[in-house]
Image (cartoon, rainbow, N blue to C red):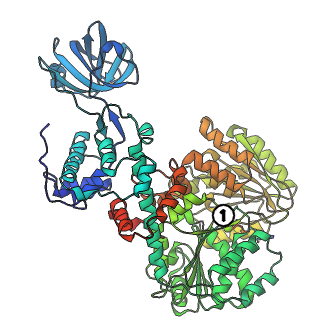
């Protein structure tokens, strides 16, 4: 391998093209894996290591080993079968090994002449004729074997068109550049932390991870426990937290509107409700109320299980903003959910002459224009809608409060776009509602400094839902059960979840199911609702179901959240194994709202994997959304729980929020050290978040 020429006088944040031999084309490929600068290369930590520092004798080979071997070729042959493969037989002392190539060319086959010496690196596997290596890296020689590597070989994540060898070369070049410039990697963690925990310096840590000596661990699981790796994890998490704090401080520079202490509308609304607020609702309402008496923008996450009554709390907050003369936006991820909010808010606020308007993607152009006008001139006080509310053409008159339901479905960028729609120089308060409980430390690491309110109490009279897991082959029994439930005057949901990725195909699946059920249950009134219907059609079906003019409602997951029909107390979820736990729990929350006992049948298709079974069992055993979410977090990781977009926005290089969750309290402590050192804080953020900063916002 030709040694790369070191470069001089470059800075850590110089583009990778400042390295010799790196052009635009290569830089573009690197950009795909978020490597833009020399520092990005240095912080690109290996996935694992390979040991090419010594040769393992053939008689010591075991399946599963990744190792370097040396032997003599004793013959080669084409093996004809389903796929022709090239088999090369090797011998050393009295031990044998086969090499197998499935992709090869004729010349290659000729090179394996009997008597040649060969050195190979690869994984040892059991083969049809003893141990073998499939597609090893190899080097044929006559006399002089190639030199052994001095250190373990790092294996990096890479992208199409950049070989491992090239990636190693690039990292090495960046490292050499850094070695010539002592100021490149200053120590940015507090000295006491380094000493107390016996951590290596940043330079030592990077050297150990990129160019490890022999006794370093081989795989990431082990490496991530090494002091070198731990050090980088801590540093990255601190940097990330500091970055979130900076973003939050930036936001605090623009004042939020200060709402009045007494909102006549909120007080009136409370007296007109057919129920009284639970203690938990009262408490949370007070927390929000207190937050909005200041010019500091509120960012409060309101968590509460499905059915815990988050909406009325949001409505009370909205009253406060309205009385202070501000507009309120209520944003939901699906049209059905947004419609449910529209319905609730109209029911509660129409009698108080509050003007509520609707804004959604599928609206008629003329209606949309009227809505947009009313938003701009301030006539609209409450705006309910889907993502259409943060589109460019929508200008707000006086936006003071943003309420986002089911936050994890919206990306940070979308939320940011909406905040920027507030009047120049002000920041609206934000209330983020979620039925998915995110552990506090995790939420802080994803959102920075946000406040939490939890409604930890259901309205009185709710009964737990009896959940059963049932094999799809027992469909007949399920149909009998529907028949008997409907005969006694109850109503039933049948949910057909995402089987196909395309919405059209999903709807077809629901249509097919509705046809089959209509044949099987000829005396029932069966309705169908799916995402391809117009909002008016959906609304008609939903209100007929609500008025008990439909017995059995077949629906895709569009139904999901917000739908409230107390007389429906049986739900069947088809292909339940394909849905996430949180989503299943939300769907199931549509039943159990009335007086009768409710049941949920989770139907699965065989074969069911062990993990899938375990997941469904969690749901069978628990009605507690918070406990379910914790389990979901353990089984699926924070990316899934926070939503992939959200996790993408976290964009950590080395740390892993779930694996390293135990470090988070320490990270929050460490972060405080930087309050008096904005220079260090800035350098740390620059080092780790640098070019990725656009992803982080609050
Ligand atoms: P979620 O928290 O899942 O959004 P909702 O706000 O949709 O729950 O409330 C679920 C149902 O409970 C609604 O029909 C709502 O009117 C009702 N509800 C809310 N608070 C109370 C309460 N304190 N007492 C009785 N019913 C309530
Ligand atoms: Mg809700």
Q: How many marks?
A: 1
Q: Nearer the viewer, residue 277 or 477?
A: 277
Q: Residue at x 42, y 50 (%)?
A: 195
Query: Which residue has dot 1 on it?
Result: 561
Please determine whether, in this image, residue 508 is positioned above or below residue 537: above
SS class, disc 1: loop
Please determine whether, in this image, residue 609 is positioned above or below residue 508: above
Ligand 2 quarter of the rendering: bottom right
Q: Is residue 579 visible?
A: no
Residue 417 x/y as whole percent:
45, 75
Q: Residue at x 83, y 77 (%)?
A: 274
Q: Nearer the viewer, residue 176 or 197?
A: 197
Asked if residue 64 lies left or right of residue 452, the reply is: left
**Mark 1 C-beta to ligand 2 under 8 Å:** yes
Q: Is residue 583 visible?
A: yes
Q: Nearer the viewer, residue 392 or 47?
A: 47
Residue 216 x/y as whole percent:
36, 34
Classed neighbour count for the residue bearing mark 1: other residues with Cα under 10 Å, few (<14), some (14–19), many (≥20): many
Q: Quadrant of residue 9?
A: bottom left
Asked if residue 261 lies left or right of residue 165, the reply is: right
Asked if residue 101 lies left or right of residue 309, the reply is: left
Residue 535 x/y as whole percent:
61, 72
Q: Quadrant of the N terminus?
A: top left
């Amino acid at each position: 391998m030709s040694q790369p020429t070191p470069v001089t006088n470059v800075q850590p944040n110089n583009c990778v093209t400042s390295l010799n031999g790196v052009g635009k084309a290569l830089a573009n490929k690197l950009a795909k894996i978020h490597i833009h600068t020399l520092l990005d290369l240095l912080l690109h930590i290996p996935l694992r290591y390979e040991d090419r520092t010594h040769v393992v004798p053939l008689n010591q080979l075991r399946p599963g080993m990744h190792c370097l071997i040396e032997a003599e070729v004793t013959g080669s042959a084409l093996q004809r079968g389903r796929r022709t493969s090239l088999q090369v037989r090797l011998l050393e002392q009295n031990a044998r090994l086969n090499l197998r190539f499935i992709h090869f060319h004729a010349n290659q086959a000729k090179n394996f002449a009997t008597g040649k010496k060969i050195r190979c690196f690869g994984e040892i596997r059991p083969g049809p004729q003893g141990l073998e290596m499939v597609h090893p890296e190899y080097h044929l020689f006559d006399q002089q074997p190639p030199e052994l590597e001095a250190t373990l070989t790092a294996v990096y994540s890479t992208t199409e068109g950049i070989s491992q060898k090239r990636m190693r070369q690039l990292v090495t070049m960046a490292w050499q550049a850094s070695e010539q410039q002592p100021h490149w990697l200053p120590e940015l963690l507090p000295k006491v932390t380094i000493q107390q925990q016996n951590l290596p310096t940043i330079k030592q840590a990077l050297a150990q991870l990129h160019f490890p000596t022999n006794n370093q661990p081989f795989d990431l699981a082990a490496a991530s426990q090494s002091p070198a790796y731990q050090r980088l994890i801590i540093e990255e998490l601190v940097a990330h937290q500091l970055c979130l704090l900076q973003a939050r401080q930036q936001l605090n520079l623009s004042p939020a509107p200060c709402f009045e202490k007494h909102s006549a509308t909120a007080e009136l609304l409370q007296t007109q409700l057919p129920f009284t607020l639970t203690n938990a609702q009262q408490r949370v309402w007070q927390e929000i109320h207190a937050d909005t008496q200041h010019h500091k923008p509120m960012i409060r996450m309101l968590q509460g299980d499905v059915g815990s009554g988050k909406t009325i709390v949001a409505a009370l907050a909205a009253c406060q903003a309205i009385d202070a003369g501000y507009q309120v936006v209520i944003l939901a991820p699906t049209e059905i959910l947004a419609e449910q909010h529209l319905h609730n808010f109209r029911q509660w606020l129409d009698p108080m002459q509050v003007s509520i308007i609707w804004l959604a993607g599928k609206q008629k152009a003329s209606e949309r224009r009227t809505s947009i006008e009313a938003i701009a001139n301030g006539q609209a006080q409450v705006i309910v809608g889907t993502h259409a509310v943060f589109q460019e053409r929508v200008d707000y008159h006086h936006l003071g409060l943003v309420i986002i339901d089911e936050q994890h479905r919206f990306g940070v960028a979308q939320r940011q776009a909406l905040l920027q729609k507030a009047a120049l120089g002000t920041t609206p308060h934000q209330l983020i509602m979620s039925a998915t409980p995110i552990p506090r430390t995790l939420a802080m690491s994803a959102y920075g400094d946000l406040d939490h309110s939890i409604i930890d109490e259901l309205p009185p009279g709710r009964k737990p839902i009896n959940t059963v897991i049932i094999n799809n082959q027992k469909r007949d029994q399920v149909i009998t059960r529907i028949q008997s439930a409907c005969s006694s005057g109850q109503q039933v949901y049948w949910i057909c979840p995402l089987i196909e990725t395309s919405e059209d195909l999903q709807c077809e699946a629901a249509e097919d199911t509705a046809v089959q059920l209509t044949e099987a249950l000829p005396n029932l009134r069966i309705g169908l609702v799916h995402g391809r219907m117009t909002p008016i059609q959906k609304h008609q079906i939903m209100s007929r179901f609500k008025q008990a003019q439909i017995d059995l409602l077949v629906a895709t997951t569009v139904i999901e959240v917000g739908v409230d029909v107390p007389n429906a107390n049986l739900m069947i979820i088809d292909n339940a194994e394909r849905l996430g736990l949180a989503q299943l729990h939300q769907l199931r929350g549509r039943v159990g709202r009335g007086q009768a006992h409710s049941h949920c049948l989770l139907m699965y298709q065989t074969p069911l994997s062990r993990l899938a079974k375990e997941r469904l069992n969690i749901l069978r055993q628990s009605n507690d959304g918070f406990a379910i979410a914790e389990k979901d977090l353990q089984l699926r990781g924070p990316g899934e729980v926070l939503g992939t977009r959200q996790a993408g926005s976290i964009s950590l290089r080395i740390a892993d929020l779930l694996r390293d969750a135990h470090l988070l309290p320490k990270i929050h402590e460490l972060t405080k050290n930087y309050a008096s050192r904005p220079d260090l804080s800035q350098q740390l953020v620059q080092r780790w978040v640098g070019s990725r900063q656009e992803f982080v916002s609050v």
